[in-house]
Amino acid sequence: MPKEFESFRVGQKAILIRDGKCLIVECADRPNVWDLPGGRIDKNEEGEEAFRREIKEETGLDNFAILAVADYAIIYWRNDFPMCGVANLIKNDHDTVTLSFEHSSYRWIAESEIDGFEYIWPSMARMIKNGFKYYKLFQVNAR
């Protein structure tokens, strides 16, 4: 009997932490619902290429280092379509954030504020918390 495999998409999100605060973006079409910058991999696109494209489109940032995969989750997105969401910790210490039309505002939140927001994915708060764990490890190892 042949095995059936479920089709799914891959979405990548950026965890950018500066001065102990993480960048979150507000969804333009869903007020008071927050997200991390990022998006899906398009057909015939490599993972890192897609990630860099999405971050530039959504934040204007194109000069950043990818430090680690901080977390991942399986999400059943709109219409129950399965998606593997990957959160990458990135580093960019100085460039200005410029939002795309997809987001209406942005905030820099401290680790203690993570649970005070509604996120687009149920697992996003956990992803951000894990991003802070990796950020702290990189801070210690950089000394």
Image (cartoon, rainbow, N blue to C red):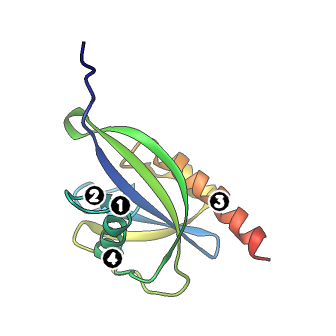
Q: Which residue is mark 1?
A: 47
Identify the amino acid type marked 3: Tyr
The numbered dot on residue 41 is: 2
Would you say the residues marked 1 and 2 are in contact, meaning their CB atoms lie under 8 Å apart? yes
Q: Which residue is mark 4?
A: 56
Q: Is residue 49 left or right of residue 124?
A: left
Instruction: Judge depth for marks 1 and 4 and give the one in front.
Output: 1
Say which quarter of the image contains residue 54.
bottom left
Give the quadrant of residue 38. Answer: bottom left
C-alpha gap between disc 2 and disc 4: 14 Å
Disc 1 residue type (three-letter):
Gly
Residue 45 visible to the viewer: yes
Q: Is the C-beta separation of discs 2 and 4 under 8 Å?
A: no
Taking the view exactly as shown, the residue that stands out farthest to the front is 1
Mark 2 or 4, nearer chain start: 2
* CB under 8 Å between discs 4 and 3: no
Name the residue nearer the viewer: 103 or 13: 13
Q: Please name the amino acid that badge 2 sits on.
A: Ile
Q: Earlier in the sequence, mark 4 or mark 3?
A: 4
Q: Quadrant of residue 110?
A: bottom right
Q: Position of residue 138 (x, y in %)?
A: 69, 68
**Discs 2/3, front:** 2
Which mark, residue 134? 3
Pointer 1 or 2: first along the chain: 2
Q: Is residue 29 above or below residue 123?
A: below
